[in-house]
Amino acid sequence: MDDKEQEEMFGFTGFGKRKKQQPKQAAPISFDSDVRKSGPSIPVPVPVSSLSISNMSLALRQVIEQTSAALDPDAHVHGGAQHTSQHKGFVPSGTTQDHQQQQQLIDEEIDEEDEEDEAQPLFPTSHEAILKEHKKVVSALAIDPSGARFSSGSHDYDVKLWDFGGMGGGVGRPFKSFEPNENYYVNDLKYSIAGDQLLVISGTAQAKLYDRDGEEVTTFIKGDPYIRDMKNTAGHVHELSACAWHPKDPQTFITSSADSTIRIWDIENKRKQKTVIVVKSKERGSRTKVTSCAYSHDGSYIAATCLDGAVHLWSTTSNYVRPNMSNETAHAKGTETSSIVLSLDGRTLLTRGGDDTVKTWDIRAFKKPLYALGGVTTMYPGMNAIWSPDEKFVVVGAGTPPSGNGSPAGGKLMFLRREGLTVADEVQMNSCVVKVIWHSKINQIFTSHADGSIHILYSPHTSTHGAKLLNRQRDKRAHTIEDASAALIEAPILTGADGGFREDAEININAFIGPSAKRKREKERMDPRKSMRPELPVSGPGRGGRVGASATQHIVQNLVRDTMRDEDPREALLRIGAKVDNDPMWTRAWKETQPKPVFQEAEEEKEDDD
């Protein structure tokens, strides 16, 4: 190493002048690893808007022609009026050639834009990101309104929270995992309209509210199971099945349960619900399980499906005694109708039943469905059907049972046209699709599967953020001489975790450079085993010749406090006797007639003169 390199190493170069740093360039993002092997089977071009590109190109050409004519160098002024060379019947050859080149470039750009618009698919299914952290079927899925975070619940009793901002560089792991109720399935998850609270519905009778970071906020009350009338109970008495937030009131949500009720709650009151909707079955006097519930987009209706195949709608301005609209035979009896969604206009209802059918209804004529599609295999309770963001399509997941030729069971994602419920596209999956959510803001489709995985379908051209951030490469800046000199000047402390205390240990400078290495060192120094921290001296009060006490002794001392052992019984009796004489509680009635005790006087023994 020469003198110049040594000066650069210790920061003495340039005589105090700081070198200009080159601007950092973002690493290119590649989505080649997420390309699906089998893309969409039926490509549908994106419809062209009312303002066509030809009209825009014509207007653009007119502007360019006017600009070129105004800036023509051969234009001259004659008699106070401006005349161009074109008025004289003469056009310079150079101007015509430049104008033709400009028109040719514009035409090429417009043709490229037309080809790009035609190549963009209608459904964002060209690429796929897979996250697998659950061990069993993912039965619940929710995305916050911004599309930055989502949560998942499974039959392994866990709820996991995911953040796209912290999963860059291919690290697809949740930032938090917790078990809301021990040994109970997670049935439903819903984010509030502001995205700051998460409502968790598990197999118990109590709903739980968590904040955005997974900290428990409220646990709502459980009702009395021995009360027959469900209107008189303060909460649910059986397993919860689904929940929904009010679309306009952030303080209100509803829950449905197997106790044949839908309850409207206020998040500020965990001791009792606001209103109880008792659902009665068509069989007189019997109850039925409410399998799903939903609000309309304007909050004017509450919709619910039941185990007996019925679908009910209540107006939020009514007293909820009877449903305003009802269809007792919407789906087959005894099957779990697992999904109900209303359209934006509030007139069309979408349901999915356990009888392997998907139906659309007009609530103005609620007796017969508009369209119905059979053969949609429902293998798990809670499998849903949703509208596309423009509500021109219905998206539904299904399972495919194993065939006789030895092919394993799988799943598929189906895109159905709203008119007729005909299949517009199908995407084959490796496992049964349980939950489907199409987030309109980031234009990505989230699916949960029976094998414990979560698939995110997206398009690099039409989707924004979300799963595209998973391919963001970390900025791996190369170590410079300044970093190495700073690491040597700081003189890092070597511990057992760093490989110190050995003569043959080599100092690795790369281990002391960068923010990640700093966090690693701080974490290792907090670990008493890795840092070989000596045991702390025993401190505290002593007893029996020993200093301190164990945790068991501390608990026993707090539980069993025998104070009578250190107290004189004669003094205690005298103290109690004086209190009884001054304030006789039990002998006050015969205090005046009670004879006074006469004690024998003590006689002194006479000593014998002997």
Image (cartoon, grey):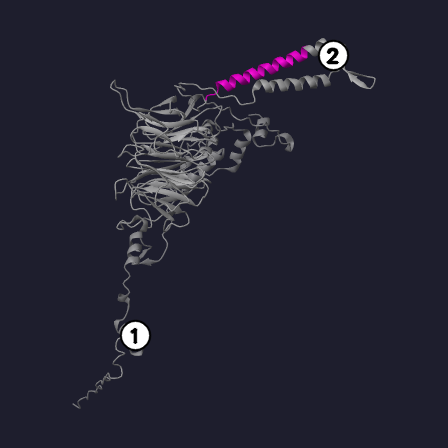
Asked if the magenta segment contains residue 207, the reply would be: no
Furthest residue in direction right, as rendered: 79
| Type of amino acid under label 2 | Gln
| Quarter residue 131 falls in | top left
Residue for badge 2? 86
Image quadrant where one finds the N terminus: top right
Front residue of 24 and 256:
256
The answer to whether residue 365 is above or below residue 602 is above
- Of the numbered discs 1 and 2, the one sitting upstream in the chain is 2
Image quadrant where one finds the C terminus: bottom left
| Type of amino acid under label 1 | Arg
Q: Residues within 10 Å of mark 2 (few under 14, many from 20)?
A: few
Residue 284 percent across, percent down from the top left: 25, 42
Residue 135 percent across, percent down from the top left: 32, 32
- Disc number placed over residue 261 in the picture, else none: none
| Quarter residue 200 falls in | top left
Whether residue 92 appears in this view of the structure is yes
Residue at the image position 47 percent from the left and 24 percent from the top = 460
Magenta span: 97-121
Front residue of 600 and 373:
373
Residue 168 percent across, percent down from the top left: 46, 30
Residue for badge 1? 575
| Quarter residue 79 falls in | top right
Q: Secondary structure at mark 2?
A: helix
Q: Secondary structure at mark 1?
A: helix
User: Which of the two discs, 1 and 2, sits closer to the camera?
Assistant: 2
Front residue of 223 and 595:
223
Asked if the magenta segment contains residue 106, the reply would be: yes
Residue at the image position 27 percent from the left and 71 percent from the top = 568
Q: CA distance from mark 1 to mark 2?
A: 127 Å
